[in-house]
Amino acid sequence: MVQHNLLARLDDKIKDSIILVMQRLHVEDLAGHFLQNGGWEHLSLPAVADSEAVIPIGAGRFYTRKAGELLHPEREPQQVLDRLRISMGSANFSAQCQQSAIPKGGHLINWDWFRKI
């Protein structure tokens, strides 16, 4: 529903673009909705790079970000991020700082899925 309303509001429905810039908060936030429905280009910039990533920065130029590299070490050095992870908890840190929202209960095995025989 949200996606259709946004598209209808474009002045030039052929050339215009929609850019959503946000910090992830939950798997069902607006970004999560768009990602689930597909059709969007996704740029995620976690505070700490999970893996090597090649990021387009315009005019055929790219930046290669190494695994473990901090996004902005001058503003958020490793010790600050470590304190945030402890104070926020893993799930909130993953969503807000790593841009990777985790469903409630995490990606763990739910014992209710299994029956005793």
Image (cartoon, grey):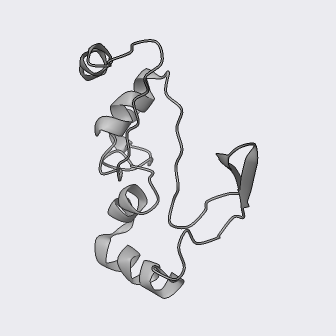
Q: Is residue 63 above or below residue 110?
A: below
Residue 77 pos. (x, y %): 51, 83
Residue 67 pos. (x, y %): 69, 64
Residue at image point 39% right, 74% down: 85
Q: Is residue 86 above or below residue 14?
A: below
> For the C terminus, which image quadrant?
top left
Q: Is residue 50 visible?
A: yes
Most foreground residue, 81 or 105: 81
Residue 78 pos. (x, y %): 52, 82
Apparent side of residue 68 relative to residue 90 in the rendered image (left or right): right
Q: How many marks?
A: 0
Apparent side of residue 81 relative to residue 43 in the rendered image (left or right): left
Q: Is residue 115 visible?
A: no
Residue at image point 42% right, 63% down: 97
Q: Quadrant of residue 41?
A: top right
> For the N terminus, which image quadrant?
top left
Residue at image point 37% right, 36% down: 32
Residue at image point 38% right, 65% down: 93
Most foreground residue, 84 or 90: 84
Most foreground residue, 58 or 70: 58
Residue 99 pos. (x, y %): 44, 53
Q: Quadrant of residue 37?
A: top left
Apparent side of residue 30 relative to residue 66 in the rendered image (left or right): left
Furthest-bottom residue in this view: 79
